[in-house]
Amino acid sequence: MKGVSYIRRPNRPLHVYALLYLAFLYIPVLFLPLFSFNDSLYISFPLRGFTTKWYASMINNEPMLAALLNSVKVGATTAVLATILGIFGAKAVTRYRLPGRKPVVFVIMLPLVIPGIILGVALLILMSRMGVTLSLYTVTLGHILISVPFAMATMIPRFEGFDKSMEEASADLGENAIWTFWRVTLPIMFPGVLASLLLCFTISFDEFIMAFFLAGTDPTLPIFIYSQLRFPQKLPGVLALGACILVISFLVVFFSQWLRHRGTAGTARVGI
Amino acid sequence: MSGKDAYISINNVSKRFGPVVAVDGINITISGGEFFSLLGSSGCGKTTLLRVLAGFEAPTSGEVYIDDMAMSEVPPHLRPTNMVFQNYAIFPHLNVRGNIAYGLRKDKLAKAELLRRVDEALEMVKLPGFGDRRSNQLSGGQRQRVALARALIKRPKVLLLDEPLGALDKKLREEMQIELRALQQTVGITFIFVTHDQEEALTLSDRIAVMSEGRVLQVASPKELYNRPVSVEVADFIGQMNFTDATVIDVQNGRAALDTASLGRVQVPVNGDFASKGAQVVVAIRPEMLSLSRERGPQGENAVQGVVKTAAYLGDRSHFYVSVDGSDKPFAVAAREAPTSLTQSLDAGTPVWLTWPDEAPIVLPRP
């Protein structure tokens, strides 16, 4: 063991455990792309043959494309609004002497731990009591509610990480609060803003329960997929769609994490 | 004291943070073009006072006037002050040129004029050609210069500096001190400089306000502060000082006699107000005003006997600590000349005589 620290020394049981863990996480997911290329209606081994016809059929599936567009609209709106709220919320709790700061943060973060079904039912009751027709707007509202905590959680460390004297310097050099936000705060926060946008979009894009309760006649993509599961012949098409979403989600999350990391590293490099 | 030439007038300013009194009823008047330092150990309120001047903190009570204008209703971005922050606060997303030009947006200058002004500012802080550097490509000293250029390009009436040299190494700090002083004399702007380093304050300033626990102990020129401190606290803070308790025995004919705990009977010349007979005071004496000799000098010379406790030779000068009866702390003696055969031979344990000129002792009120 000479020259090898206690932490670094090889640990075979731990390696095996780590491999099993990763396999358990990802092998089921990998069945999606695998069967989406399988030339058979039924999801079973042995595989029949390679085909891309399920992908081809996807392109002509009008209701599915409509649902996809709905999800993109809801996701984009959610991402923008939740991120804006997240920026202001994070600025408020990190920058100002706020009475009751801790309870406020707690309440904002609460949707993280409240089950989606509870929030969904609660909002459904609220909407019907208020006579609001269910639509993509109500879905967006629900999604903003659950995305804001994530946006805040992304922004707060960035606000804490950058020196308040930057904003003071801007004020000192003659810029008011709005210009300071525009010329200093936002550019320095930019990687965090981008990460938050991507994260909130992803959350909204694959959210099912709230959308299930709050959607009107226009389904979002997860609702559409769920409705397709009743028809066995539609299943391979859903697998193809699932595989596409998997790849895109992975890229988006990877990109946002990379941005976040780069943002933090950038601040550290400045070394204030 | 609110004379017409008073550029900045700090009138009875206090600042409380909850129960903590950071600044406690401060009155200072600073004239135009002055290099003024706020000196004190950390937590004395000097930075808070500077932030009140910049507008980042509103005073709990009192008022600041700059050029006869009350400042309490003026937000930071409209004040005729600019600040060099302790950590410089260089904007990381802008290059050096972007940082320096930051405050000129509202001036709506033509591009060529803007670039000329930035180059001029870079020239002034001795960083020509650095415009395209990114902030993370700058050393500490360069960041400090950029912060200085960024503030001075606004041509403020008052430049506020919050320990700007604290983060630099000793050699660079001494260079920057000289440059800062020269720069201030060139631009003629009032500088208000916060520091905890008394040597720095003495080197740079026209006048210094010594602060402690939110209050000003003394405002004076460096020379006056050193030679005529008004309290034990100031005397102790500025340079090194020996103290001994004393009682006033007699005051007459321009001289006062005092009985001291460790220096025996001390005679001092009196001018102006002086403590009355019987008053309990403190006598202070600078280490460099004391000299050492093996033999007692002529009758009438101020002298007291002691024993060398420690001796340190520092090349161009020597420091001794001499134990004297009646004082638990040994007396510091600084011999400012090169070591002589006398100072070389004064090892620990050697009995010596401490002598001092008549004008050396300073009489201070007992705290």
Image (cartoon, rainbow, N blue to C red):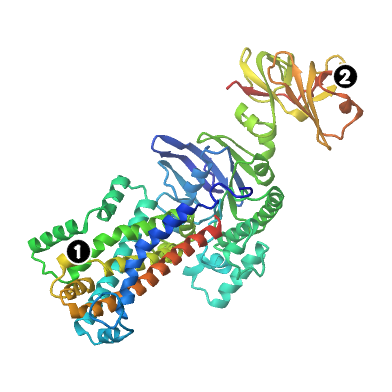
In the image, A206 versus B34, the foreground residue is A206
The picture quadrant where one finds residue B151 is: bottom right
Q: Looking at the rendering, which quadrant does residue B264 occupy?
A: top right
Tell me which amino acid carries mark 2. Arg
Question: Could you tell me how far apart the alpha carbons at marks 1 and 2 are, in whole angstroms?
Answer: 96 Å
Which residue matches tag 2?
B294
Quadrant in the picture for the C terminus of chain B: top right
Q: Is residue A69 visible?
A: no
Q: Position of residue B261 (x, y in %)?
A: 69, 14
Q: Which residue is mark 1?
A: A209
Circle 2 crowding by C-alpha within 10 Å: few under 14, some 14–19, many from 20: few
The image's mark for residue A114 is none
Outermost residue to the front = A46
Q: Comparing marks 1 and 2, which lies closer to the viewer?
A: 1
- The mark tally for this picture is 2
Q: Are marks 1 and 2 in contact (CB under 8 Å)?
A: no
Chain of the residue under label 1: A
Q: Secondary structure at mark 2?
A: loop
Classify mark 1: helix, strand or loop. Answer: helix
Residue found at x 69% / y 47%: B170
Residue at 64% x, 21% y: name it: B274
Q: Is residue A45 above or below residue B176?
A: below
Q: Is residue B41 above or below residue A137?
A: above
> Are discs 1 and 2 both within one chain?
no
Q: What is the x, y in percent for residue B62?
A: 43, 41
Q: Position of residue B157 (x, y in %)?
A: 55, 56
